[in-house]
């Protein structure tokens, strides 16, 4: 069986990535979300093991020392990492895996796998809109919002690292764009639109 595709998805926080991803994940089969480890405390609506594996800094550092991460980065003063085990077995089973990671992590995977992963960047339509979205969601302090805006500037400079760029002006269009990319990459990988190996029964 052809191994699955690895989709790397990055965006400045507030670009709408989580909403777009959740929608596409609910629509497409054979697409698995890789749950990262983080030292960030959970937000009110987040579930351990589903949104993230929430761990303390000691556990994270131990995993890092044992080479358990495919990539890792410090983002907004917290550690985040993708464990190798959460990715490789799914790919080997022919499932597509989505990594929601920052630009530093994406660069590590680009260096390790070259073209053997699909890199997608989601951007907001404007700075004003990004600030509105970050302020409007009411989950973060002013200090956190400023930190995120600063990081967004740096991340937007790295857009050339990515194969595809989606501008999230209208959520439905951004969802359609991401879905189209995933389907196109499946077909390129000689699989059906549903992500299954192509079979071509011959008459006996
Ligand atoms: P948040 O704290 O808002 O959930 O995520 C902050 C940033 O960390 C986002 O840009 C997200 O994509 C990134 N992130 C989440 N998990 C990982 C990971 O495993 N590795 C890396 N490098 N970044 C991650």
Image: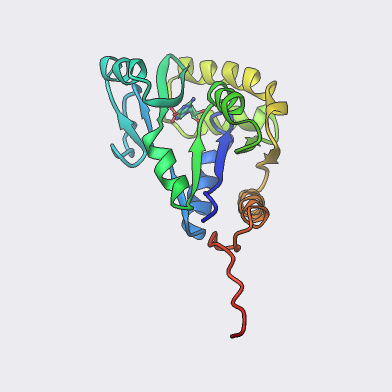
| Residue 197, x across and y down, in percent | 55, 62
Above or below residue 191? Residue 70 is above
Of 167 and 180, the residue lying toward us: 180
Q: Looking at the rendering, which quadrant does residue 128 occupy? A: top right
Residue 16 in view: no
Q: Is residue 61 left or right of residue 136?
A: left
Residue 99 in view: yes
Q: Split into 4 quadrants, where in the image is the C terminus?
A: bottom right
Question: What coloring was used for the rendering?
Answer: rainbow
Q: What residue is rendered at 57% in x and 26% in y?
A: 112
Q: Is residue 52 left or right of residue 16?
A: left
Q: What residue is rendered at 48% in x and 49% in y?
A: 22
Q: Is residue 34 left or right of residue 66?
A: right
Above or below residue 146? Residue 85 is below
| Residue 91, x across and y down, in percent | 47, 46
State the residue lying farthest toward the bottom. 204
Q: What residue is rendered at 70% in x and 39% in y?
A: 164
State the residue lying farthest toward the front. 204
Q: Looking at the rendering, which quadrant does residue 56 occupy? A: top left
| Residue 150, x across and y down, in percent | 59, 16
Of 154 and 83, the residue lying toward us: 83
């Amino acid at each position: 069986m052809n191994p699955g595709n690895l989709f790397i998805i990055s965006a400045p926080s507030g670009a709408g990535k989580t909403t777009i991803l959740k929608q596409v994940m609910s629509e497409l089969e054979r697409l698995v979300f890789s749950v990262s480890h983080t030292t960030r405390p959970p937000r009110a609506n987040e579930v351990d093991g589903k949104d993230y594996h929430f761990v303390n800094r000691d556990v994270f550092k131990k995993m890092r020392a044992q080479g358990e991460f495919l990539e890792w980065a410090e983002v907004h003063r917290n550690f985040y990492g993708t464990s190798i085990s959460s990715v490789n077995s799914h790919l080997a089973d022919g499932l597509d895996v989505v990594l929601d990671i920052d630009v530093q992590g994406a660069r590590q995977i680009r260096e390790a796998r070259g073209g053997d992963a699909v890199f997608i960047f989601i951007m907001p339509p404007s700075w004003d809109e990004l600030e509105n979205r970050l302020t409007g969601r009411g989950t973060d302090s002013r200090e956190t919002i400023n930190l995120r805006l600063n990081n967004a500037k740096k991340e937007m400079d790295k857009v050339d690292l990515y194969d595809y760029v989606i501008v999230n002006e209208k959520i439905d269009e951004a969802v359609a764009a991401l879905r189209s990319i995933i389907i196109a990459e499946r077909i390129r990988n000689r699989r059906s639109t549903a992500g299954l190996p192509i079979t071509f029964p011959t008459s006996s």
